Image (spheres, rainbow, N blue to C red):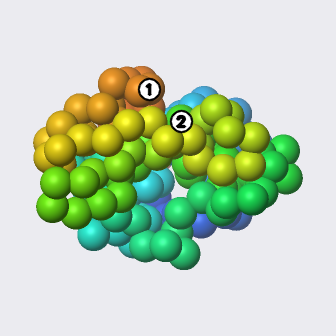
Amino acid sequence: MTQKQEKLPMGEDFIAEMAAKGHVAVKRYATYFNEGVDAEDMVDGVLVNPAPEELPLYGVPHDQRSQFEIMLWWRLPYIVGQDKEWSVYCLDGGAHDRPSYVGQGRSLKEAVKIAKARFPMSFARLEFLYNDEDEE
């Protein structure tokens, strides 16, 4: 039996379907899915300047957020800024209705370090492996 590695399509239906099947990776790690988020850049797994319409909503209590938004952003810090002002935010429950302010770096490199230190396991690289039972 061989294993086949595939990059799978993203979307709310796909994530809900995978979570329903018990895929722990879908439940715990969002970095794999955030590669599809429209952002200026991704540095070492950290999104830099995600498009405003992609960011977690402000003013929405966490228990009223969609499953998709929680799975995409929960405990996954991101960076917003430019030049010497790079702010790190994270949807992590620190504030009840918006992402928490985590810190600020004077350089993008420093901000990435701050972001990755917040929840290091959120940046684990996961790929979905599927068994191809037709091949032996």
Q: Is residue 36 above or below residue 127?
A: below
Quadrant of the frame with the C terminus: top left
How packed mark 1 is, by other alpha carbons closer than 10 Å (few <14, some 14-19, many 20 or more), is some
* Residue 71 coordinates in the image, percent (x, y): 62, 46
Residue 128 appears anywhere in the view:
no
Looking at the rendered structure, which numbered label has been put on residue 75? 2
- Of 105 and 70, nearer the camera is 105
Give the residue number, with chain letter if any, for mark 1: 119
The foreground one among 19 and 105 is: 105
- Measured in 3D between alpha carbons, the distance from the residue under mark 2 to the one under mark 1, in whole angstroms, is 6 Å
- 66 relative position to 120: left or right: right
Residue 76 appears left or right of 104? right
Q: Quadrant of residue 34?
A: bottom left
Task: Give left or right: position of 65 versus 116.
Answer: right
Q: Secondary structure at mark 1?
A: loop
Crowd tier of the residue under label 2, counting other residues whose Cα lies within 10 Å: few below 14, some 14–19, many 20 or above:
many
Residue at 68 percent across and 39 percent down: it is 95
Residue in front for this viewpoint, 54 or 34: 54
| Residue 96 appears in the picture as rendered | yes
What amino acid is at disc 1? Answer: Phe
Q: Residue 45, how many percent across, how many down?
A: 29, 45
Q: Amino acid at mark 2?
A: Arg
Mark 2 falls on what kind of element?
Answer: loop
Q: Are marks 2 and 1 in contact (CB under 8 Å)?
A: yes
Residue 102 in picture, x, y percent from top left: 44, 36
Q: Residue at x 59, y 66 (%)?
A: 11
Above or below, 3 against 84 in this view is: above
